[in-house]
Image (cartoon, helix red, strand yellow):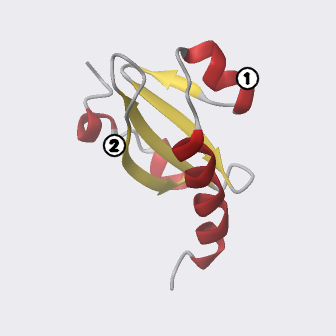
Amino acid sequence: MEYADAEEPLRAWSKVVKKAKWKNFGELRSVYGSVDVVGNCYVFNIRGNHYRLIASVSYDWTVMLICTVLTHKDYDRDQWKGDCRCDA
């Protein structure tokens, strides 16, 4: 597997998110202090900033949808923004 080093950190992220009952960005940020908002998307650092997970969140904060997971290098190319309507 090409990016095997991302598997465990992604599983850990998923485990936390599945149990979360966040109601707003402040509550999300209290758990993930480095999360950023880019347009309509939330960008998480995975595995010490080696990867970026881009997600969208429903209006009522009950659903978080993973749009893509990228290497930091691919993230920096900014081609991902249209994939998840992050540029809206």
SS for callout 2:
loop
- Residue in the foreground of this view, choosing between 78 and 21: 21
Q: Few, some or many C-alpha atoms within 10 Å of disc 1 (few <14, some 14-19, many ≥20)?
A: few
Q: Quick check: can you spot residue 60? A: yes
Quadrant assignment, res 50: bottom right
| Residue at (60% x, 53% y) in the render | 15
Q: Which residue, given by chain and number where applicable, does mark 2 sit on?
A: 80
Quadrant assignment, res 19: top right
Where does residue 61 sit, x and y in percent of width and height? 42, 22
Where does residue 26 sit, x and y in percent of width and height? 64, 13
Where does residue 40 sit, x and y in percent of width and height? 36, 21
| Residue at (62% x, 25% y) in the render | 28
**Cβ atoms under marks 2 and 1 closer than 8 Å:** no
Point out which mark residue 30 bears: 1
SS for callout 1:
helix
Residue positioned most to the bottom: 1
Q: In the figure, 54 relative to 60: above or below?
A: below
User: What amino acid is found at the position of numbered circle 2 in the picture?
Assistant: Trp
Where does residue 62 sit, x and y in percent of width and height? 40, 28
| Residue at (30% x, 23% y) in the render | 87
| Residue at (70% x, 57% y) in the render | 47
Split into 4 quadrants, where in the image is the C terminus?
Answer: top left
Cα distance between the residues tagged 2 and 1:
26 Å
